[in-house]
Amino acid sequence: MPVSGGISYDLDEQLDPTADDLAYPESSLPEGFELLWTLPGGWFVAEHAGARFTISHQAHSVWEDFPPSALLPRAHRINDHLLGLEWTDGAPLDAPLPFKEAARCLHELVDFVLALEHHGYGLVDLEPSSILRTSEALHLRTLPTVIPLGATADSIHREGLTPPEIYTSQPVTPTTATFVLGALLTFWISGRWPSLDQDPVLPAGLPVIPGVPHLLRRLLQHDPTLRPTPHQLRAELCAFLRPPAPRYSIGVATTVGLNPERPLNEDAYAYSHQDATFHEAAGVRLVACVADGIGGLEAGDEASGAATRSFVESTSEQAEERFWQANAAVHTALGSRPGGCTFTGVVINGTTVQLVHVGDTRAYRVTPRGCEQLTPDHSLVELLIRQGALTAEHAAHHPQRNAILRSLGGVTERTPEYCFTSEFKLAPGECLVLMSDGVWGGIPAQHLWRIMTEAQDAIAMADALIAAALSSGGADNATALIVHCG
């Protein structure tokens, strides 16, 4: 938008923005235009060749050069004195609105205000009834009043909406617009305009939402320097509109099993759960993992213990980076001794889950609709199944069903595509289940979902899985770790 040349800043040419139903001689319209009705603020609706226009004889040449905006109607110069806007169908915003709906609408206006600020202009007034909701976005039926930042405005008065600095001829700043937006938000969520005689008095009927009265009071400060800037307002609206941080609960259970020849539980698990709020920003970080020491090799318990400790204690944001740090930790713990472990771990930030896996521990996602295995088995029988040499039914009884093709500690250096990784969202009501083969080997897949959904909470889920594994024979170490998203 140009800031000089061809733009009129003469506010005396503009009509009172609150004037209603101004008389407009139909004879002033060009030939072929039919006057239909008047709108507040000196605007008129007319029709020409079957097309409807909103028309004003105010000086609005600034808008003819303004970059396209989803909020603005397309402007056409009808003649030297009249500006016509393409007609937009839409529904007015009927107050009071639910707060989040009002905040989303205000967010769109803030983006428009930031575009104005970028081109050196400030919003000082707009007609509330001209703000329409369309199927795509908000739309203005008439144009707002804007002037260059640093200039002064007069001849504007709209009770409850006009910024105090307009009355005292102070220069317009970016926070002039935030006052207008604060007044609009107050009206949208309460159905009443704020009282602005002295300090802002918020009307009754505001929603009982923590932080909303505080935001409105800052937006409606008489001193422009005490108000948030449009950028700050946008950030605060985003915080209100951000989904609440998920709440996670964790349940875990493990057992050495019933085989007297395996007196040591070589499974290991670990988790770390951080739920914190810093300066209005909520953050959830959860790290969890299950490992199973490889049977028949030395120090399987040391391998699984080193892997789980390293994975949880790492400070890396990336699950795969934690995986390779855990791989190094296994080699350090074992020294020259052969060994390793299968491993499945997750790093959860908010609702985003990073999953990393190797071997035949498993991860499942359990939803109200069913149960989904998320990880492949890096095992001999799984390879034979993929090659068509073995069926899933026969795999359960294959003499080498416990043979592992990949493990944590199985390689000394990073190897591309060695571990399985994926990333997905976890929704409220869903669970992640990390388990060793001692659990899934004894529970048919079709029974897993039933066991999980019958339990009352994450701890009960983990206990029920271990109980089911023991009931099936329980010859192996068994571990189940549940992450429930509430």
Image (cartoon, rainbow, N blue to C red):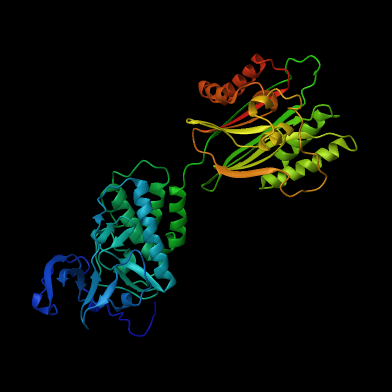
Q: In this orientation, which residue lies closer to the viewer: 196 or 53?
A: 53
Residue 179, x across and y down, in percent: 36, 60
Q: How many labels sit on residues?
A: 0
**Residue 41 appears in which quarter of the rendering?**
bottom left
Residue 419, compared with residue 254, is above or below; it is below
Residue 261 visible in rendering = yes
Q: Which of 48 and 317 is in front in this view?
A: 48
Pinpoint residue 59: horizontal percent, then vertical percent. Answer: 25, 78
Residue 414 % position (x, y):
77, 48
Q: Check the picture and name the quadrant holding the N terminus.
A: bottom left
Residue 175 seen anywhere in this rendered image of the structure: no
Frontmost residue, 13 versus 84: 84
Query: Which image quarter: residue 54?
Result: bottom left
Q: Which residue lies furthest to the bottom in this view?
A: 5
Residue occupying the point 57% across, 21% down: 460
Identify the image quadrant of residue 63. bottom left
Q: From the viewer's perspective, is 452 left or right of 47?
A: right
Residue 404 vertical placement versus 191 (above, below): above
Could you tell me which residue is drawn at 35 percent across and 54 percent down?
Answer: 105
User: Does 187 sit left or right of 117 as displayed?
Assistant: left
Residue at the extreme right? 336
- Give x and y (percent) for residue 455: 53, 21
Say above or below: 41 vs 160. below
